[in-house]
Image (spheres, rainbow, N blue to C red):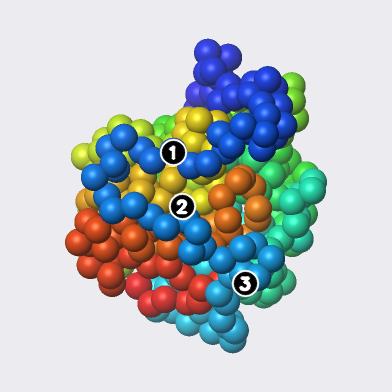
């Protein structure tokens, strides 16, 4: 097993960029989203029609937790980038975060399932990278040492206090567990737990292969050519969980987060059967309104002629059979 060395990886943005975004953009108006050049032929999206954050409630459904015990394949959105995935007879928790917030960012919508019941039923936990909205030790302590943890290189040390079985993977490395194969694939992002640990641990997405189908969870990522490589090197993907939020202002976020139209293009590059939208409506991370990402994704899909049943914009707590 190798050890990731992130010293040659340039940080996504520096302190000067952050100050410019937070203090100068509100004065200059540069925080307004800029359309991607390759999406300029799309009909204009009416941002003025998007509900304000003060009135918007992220759609949610009550869930009786049967998805945690039933054996048929299913996917449940907990919120943000967190899901439970039942595939190959195993229950997986993907980037599980149940906390009410971190720093000044409060949770806008409660988790879709109770943590105690999910933790008691989970066989495998997958963590895409170590940012606090994806690797939350407060949530992981509820899972404890019961499940197997699969993480990118350099992240096992963060989980040491769990005394759990942890498998670290480099990009394109795989691990098979009870008939399900997990492959860590590239993403365009970065990592940091503390200011002095920037890019000391790897990040990525997961391709999850089972006899019942193939799922992909991208983690956080910018749009990049790697989606086409994933399509070439991996089995055909049935369900692609892709982030659609935390994208404004584009000058700041483009190197690390996709906008909805880019997520749509990534879906086409991956040649997946279904796009499952994530990373929206839970935490107010960036400048766009909470309600905007799914509206823009639907706008893109309609303009591109993408079948409506291939784009899944799930409610928090919703379970879909796979």
Q: Residues within 10 Å of mark 3 (few under 14, many from 20)?
A: some
Residue at x-position 34% and y-position 52%: 44
Q: Where 279 sits versus 186, above or below?
A: below
Q: Does the residue at mark 2 contact the one at mark 3 (Cβ under 8 Å)?
A: no
Give the label, 2 or 1, closer to the camera: 1
Report, in whole angstroms, how far the alpha carbon at label 2 lies from the one at label 3.
17 Å
Q: Nearer the viewer, residue 187 or 267?
A: 267
Give the label, 2 or 3, closer to the camera: 3
Disc 2: which residue: 244
Secondary structure type for disc 2: loop
Disc 3: which residue: 57
Residue 300 sits in quarter: bottom left
Residue at x-position 65% and y-position 55%: 283
Which numbered disc, 1 or 3, marks the residue that appears first in the sequence?
1
Disc 1: which residue: 34
Report, in whole angstroms, how far the alpha carbon at label 1 lies from the one at label 3.
26 Å
Secondary structure type for disc 1: loop
């Amino acid at each position: 097993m190798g050890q990731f060395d992130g010293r040659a990886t340039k940080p996504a943005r520096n302190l000067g960029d952050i100050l410019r975004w937070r203090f100068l953009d509100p004065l200059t108006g540069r925080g307004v989203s800029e359309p991607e050049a390759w999406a300029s032929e799309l009909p204009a999206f009416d941002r003025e029609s998007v509900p304000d954050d003060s009135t918007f409630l992220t759609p949610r459904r009550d869930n009786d937790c049967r998805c945690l015990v039933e054996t048929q394949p299913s996917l449940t959105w907990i919120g943000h980038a967190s899901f439970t995935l039942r595939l190959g007879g195993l229950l997986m928790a993907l980037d599980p975060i149940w906390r009410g917030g971190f720093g000044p960012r409060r949770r806008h919508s409660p988790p879709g399932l109770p943590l105690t019941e999910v933790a008691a039923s989970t066989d495998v936990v997958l963590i895409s990278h170590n940012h606090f909205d994806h690797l939350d030790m407060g949530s992981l302590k509820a899972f404890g040492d019961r499940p197997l943890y699969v993480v990118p290189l350099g992240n096992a040390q963060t989980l040491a206090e769990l005394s759990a079985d942890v498998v670290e993977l480099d990009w394109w490395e795989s691990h098979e567990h009870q008939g399900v194969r997990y492959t860590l694939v590239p993403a365009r992002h970065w990592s940091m737990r503390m200011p002095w640990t920037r890019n000391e641990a790897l990040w990525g997405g997961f391709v999850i292969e089972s006899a019942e189908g193939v799922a992909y969870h991208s983690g956080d990522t910018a749009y990049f050519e790697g989606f086409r490589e994933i399509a070439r090197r991996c089995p055909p993907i049935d369900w692609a969980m892709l982030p659609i939020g935390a994208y404004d202002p584009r000058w700041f976020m483009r190197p690390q987060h996709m906008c909805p139209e880019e997520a749509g293009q990534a879906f086409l590059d991956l040649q997946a059967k279904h796009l499952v939208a994530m990373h929206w409506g839970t935490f107010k991370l960036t400048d766009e309104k909470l309600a905007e990402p799914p509206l823009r994704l639907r706008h893109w899909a309609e303009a591109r002629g993408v079948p409506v049943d291939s784009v899944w914009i799930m409610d928090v707590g919703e379970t879909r059979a796979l």
